[in-house]
Image (spheres, helix red, strand yellow):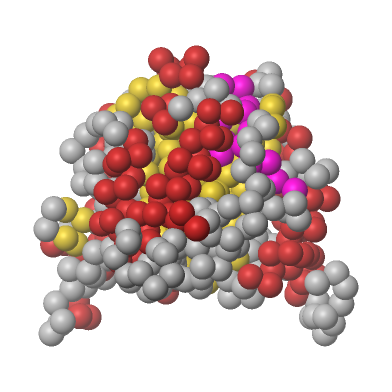
Amino acid sequence: MSLERFGKTRYGNGDIVHVPFVRAGNWVFGTGLRATQPDGLMDPAVLGNGRPLSSPPKPQREAQLIFERMRTHLDSAGSAMTRVARVDQYYPDPGSVDPYHVARKQALAGQVAPSTSIIVPGLLNKDAGMDVQVMAATSASGYAIERVKADLNAPQTSGYAPCLRVGDMVFVAGQLARDSSGNIAAEARQASGQQWNGTRIKLETEYLFKKRLLPALEAAGSHPDCVLKAQVYLSHPADLPAFLQSWAQCFGKRIPPTTIVPVTHPAFGTIDATIEVNLIAVHASAQPRIRDICCDVELIAEGALQACTFDELLFVSGLMAVDKAGLVPGAQVQASAPYFHDSAHAQMTDILAKAESIFAAAGTDLSNVVRALYFHTDLADFHAAHQAWDRELRDAGLPFSALAVAPTMFVPGASLLLDLWGYAPR
């Protein structure tokens, strides 16, 4: 079965072609879902025009439109709202979260899939309140859906399942190092008045792995060696080295494909949290079907696998234009002559070359990207970066979302991180 695209639209002057929904094998991916019109501008009915304060609140109107379209496209792609396995949200304003939850619970009939919500500085539409991603199984897959009973203290207001099994795949919602009170656990914090009783990021990472992620995996019949992909959000980018040490200790010899995103603090539902992590894994019985992909591509997630495949899906670590010395030479800008070079375009060109190597090692190519998340320090770089894709792929349409994150990346001069998911048909 080949990859199929749904809902193709052209933004701006027509050179940005967005494909919000892609069906690949037994899965449907929705990416970059916002309450926009075909021209990329926000829907006037959502904005309210002369009555912006009409009820329901604007974020709820946005979410309702997004979920209406989601239902339509999932149906067209052979899936349904009842088959959603994962839904993620990015908001520029935490005030949008509660109205969004109201609409989401209604749209998903209270059976909300594992979810990750992140506060970010900006979206591609400055007047948008949210950008949503969804992943759902097709009806033809026949996959059973099981809400796993894992004692992870999920917030009752959101209605989401902290862990879900769909067929042989396991989805763990974004986890924080919090206890049953909803606050950061005492074990994940330095004791009051002490400055060197452990490092905060190490304490949080170890707690959320041992007390949140591991119990979820075990409840679903999985374990760390069965993890296909991890998304990590760090609200203090300087914590990266200490986090990587803890992450390696958690997983041992096999560190799964990992995307580490620098975000601005506070970025999470628990205000003083500094890290949030979500996982996709498989049931232990399906572990033999995982194929790890190793190739000569430098990662910011040191020691992690470049990628792995499972049942025709390809999970890739986050990619940046870096080598062992830092930002790749081709993307560096000379301070005395900054106007002769477009670093954003050069960074994406390098990243896509890395991605092409990874996809080739998995037996596929970039025409089979099912989700591309651009994380920019400055969204003004988006257009130039997007143009680095092969023109034929751009014209076919890409399932992308672009988000502003922390103003500094992990490497001096770097301004772009790309998180790719793919399809590797057998």
As for residue 170 lying within the magenta part, the answer is yes
Could you tell me which quadrant the C terminus lies in? top left
x and y percentages locating residue 136 in the rendered image: 64, 36
As for residue 161 lying within the magenta part, the answer is yes
- Residue at the spot 58% in from the left edge and 52% down from the top edge: 179
Front residue of this view, candidates 133 and 196: 196
| Above-or-below relation of 376 to 372 | below
Give the image quarter of residue 39.
Answer: bottom right
| Above-or-below relation of 104 to 53 | above
- Residue at the spot 42% in from the left edge and 65% down from the top edge: 191
| Above-or-below relation of 54 to 88 | below
x and y percentages locating residue 50 in the rendered image: 82, 85
- Residue at the spot 22% in from the left edge and 34% down from the top edge: 295
Front residue of this view, candidates 368 and 160: 160
* Residue 250 visible to an observer of this rendering: yes
Q: Which residues, given as a range, are shown in magenta?
A: 159-172
Give the image quarter of residue 99.
Answer: bottom right
- Residue at the spot 70% in from the left edge and 46% down from the top edge: 160
x and y percentages locating residue 6 in the rendered image: 63, 42
Give the image quarter of residue 199.
Answer: bottom left
Front residue of this view, candidates 415 and 168: 168
x and y percentages locating residue 102 in the rendered image: 80, 58
367 vs 97, left or right, is left
303 vs 387, left or right, is left
Could you tell me which quadrant the N terminus lies in? top right
